Image (cartoon, rainbow, N blue to C red):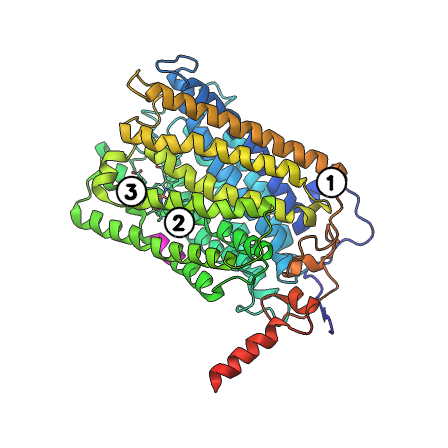
Amino acid sequence: MEKVIVPEPHVPLPSGKTDRSLLQWMASVDHKQLGIMYLLTALLFFIAGGIEILLIRIQLITPDNTFLGPDLYNQLFTMHGTTMIFLVLMPTLIGLGVYLVPLMIGANEMAFPRLNAFSLWMTLLGGLILYFSFLDGGGAPAAGWFSYAPLSSSHYSSTKGVDYYCIGLILTGIGSVTAALNLVVTILTLRIPGMDFRRLPVFVWMMFITAFLILAAFPVLNAGLVMLLIDRQLNAHFFSPASGGSAILWQHLFWAFGHPEVYILALPPFGIISEVIPVFSRQPIFGYRFLIGSGIAIALLAFGVWMHHMFAVGLGNPINGFFAAGSMLIGIPTGIKVFNWILTMRGGSIRFTTAMLFAASFIVEFTIGGLSGISFALVPLDWQLTDTYYVVAHIHYVFLGGTLYAVFAGLFYWFPKITGRKLSERLGRIFFWLFFLGFNLTFMLQHVLGILGMPRRVYTYPDLPYFGLLNLLSTVGAFLMAASIGLFFWNILTSLRKGERAGDDPWNAWTLEWASSSPPALKNFDKVPPVRSLRPLWDLKHPENPDWKNEKSKQTRNEK
Ligand code: HEM
Ligand SMILES: [Cu+2]
């Protein structure tokens, strides 16, 4: 089969052999190095956010504990949430996108390589500025990751923490918006001939949709943050009701960003597991069009549900009812996806590699998070449960059981491509089971704590029936997770040096990134297999029975 020549990148790449000095990394505009640096940025902050939460869990291990005082506790949970969302999950997903999207569409670079570097450094800079707050005498921000007014005003948060929060998040927000722009233009303009929108890998589609969500959502947050900064620094009153402003306005701005943001952190994971599940089930993805269509539907609906975070504000029954209905609607396209994945696995010859274990349990854990979300969409239930540990359980089932599980699946799947070596499957499996156990122990019980009425964000709790026991078990679970993560790091470190050599295509996969060498050369490809279906490498490996032939015969059958 004739191979297709990949067009030269827009920006000339440096010639000769690449030296891998620190300076070279810092000056790099190569999408693969930048992708790796995004992942390292996320790793750095993941360790910070992890230490913060372990301290919190130690504080909560027994009733009436005084390990951390209330002030430090407030700083730690604020920094934990802010870190995990903006500095861990965002850079991880954008980093995977920046690394993989060009390879998956047969391109040699992103559309704007220098902008790509700019986005990464803005994200890192924003994160560092946020963390400098710990060194400031007043300490870190302590108003929660959503910094509600009036708590965030200089009157109630008189240290500089919230100012660091504003500036740090404005910078990472700029990084996210520019990265999204870059992804959109790359996907629109750099696809190899033949790679039309009916043949785009699901991961690329999900990054494409996510990029539009970022472009629409982050400017709203950044505008809100600038207003908050003006309130605090220049004594304006956007969010101060006493002077004619509106505290509720902040909640609208924050959640008009915040709910789309949760889908920004959910759609790329949907894409990841839509790559992993077919390959390890040896079947093409079931219902490609429905997967893409439901992704677009979710993105549109994501902008119409934000007030479900504000049911307790007192906006009145008509508004609450409208947003309750909208929130339930979003369960439909999400449910469609779950069926797609299950039907992809049905009847397949499944290989339970570590990647597949994480992808398959993603379906279960994410659905649990979706169901607690639906229960929140019932206004009377929300009134009871809002601001309790039930919310904490929900968040973590969607972000850890969802996003992070998918990230682990993706890392085990793509690590051989990125580094040329496989991660140890033996350690991987132990890691999976330990994490699975720790995760469910920590967060399943928090549903119960929430229903028993334990409020979130309070540094200690009285010795009420079951409170001590459930919190103790939850803390044990957290340390199990920490131990499993330690094992994962160990796996990475040892596999980098001694892992089994992967070869170009260790999983016998079907998308274009596996047609490059592992790790890919500076210029990803010279030539790629022709793209005439969703699975170009399948077509290459099975000339007698290529997908495009079947697609065609289906077409002719339909036409008759
Ligand atoms: C069927 C889908 C979902 C529904 C109906 C839903 C509904 C809700 C509702 C009503 C709340 C507000 C709870 C309260 O504070 O009283 C909430 C909170 C939250 N949801 Fe969901 N959710 C869904 C899926 C998701 C997904 C996919 C994610 C993330 C990937 C997510 C992340 C969050 C977060 C982070 C919060 C807590 C925000 C905070 O208060 O700190 N949700 N959800
Ligand atoms: Cu929401």
How far separated are the C-alphas under marks 1 and 3? Answer: 45 Å
How far separated are the C-alphas under marks 2 and 1? Answer: 39 Å
Between tags 3 and 2, which lies in front? 3
Which residue matches tag 3?
A: 376
Could you tell which of marks 3 and 2 lies nearer the N-terminus? 2
- Badge number at residue 192: none
| Of the pair 408 and 220, the residue shown nearer to us | 408
Which residue matches tag 1?
A: 499
Q: Amino acid at mark 3?
A: Phe
Q: Position of residue 500 (x, y in %)?
A: 74, 43
Q: Position of residue 190 (x, y in %)?
A: 62, 64
| Of the pair 272 and 225, the residue shown nearer to us | 272
Could you tell which of marks 1 and 3 lies nearer the N-terminus? 3
| Quadrant hosting ligand 2 | top left
Q: Main secondary structure of the magenta part?
A: helix
553 sits to left or right of 305? right
Quick one: which residue is furthest to the left in this view? 317
Q: Secondary structure at mark 3?
A: helix
Question: How many residues crowd mark 1 within 10 Å: few (<14), some (14–19), many (20+)?
Answer: some
Q: Amino acid at mark 1?
A: Gly
* Residue 42: in magenta span: no
First to last magenta residue range: 298-303
Q: Position of residue 308 (x, y in %)?
A: 28, 45
Which residue matches tag 2?
A: 260
Q: Amino acid at mark 2?
A: Pro
Between tags 2 and 1, which lies in front? 1
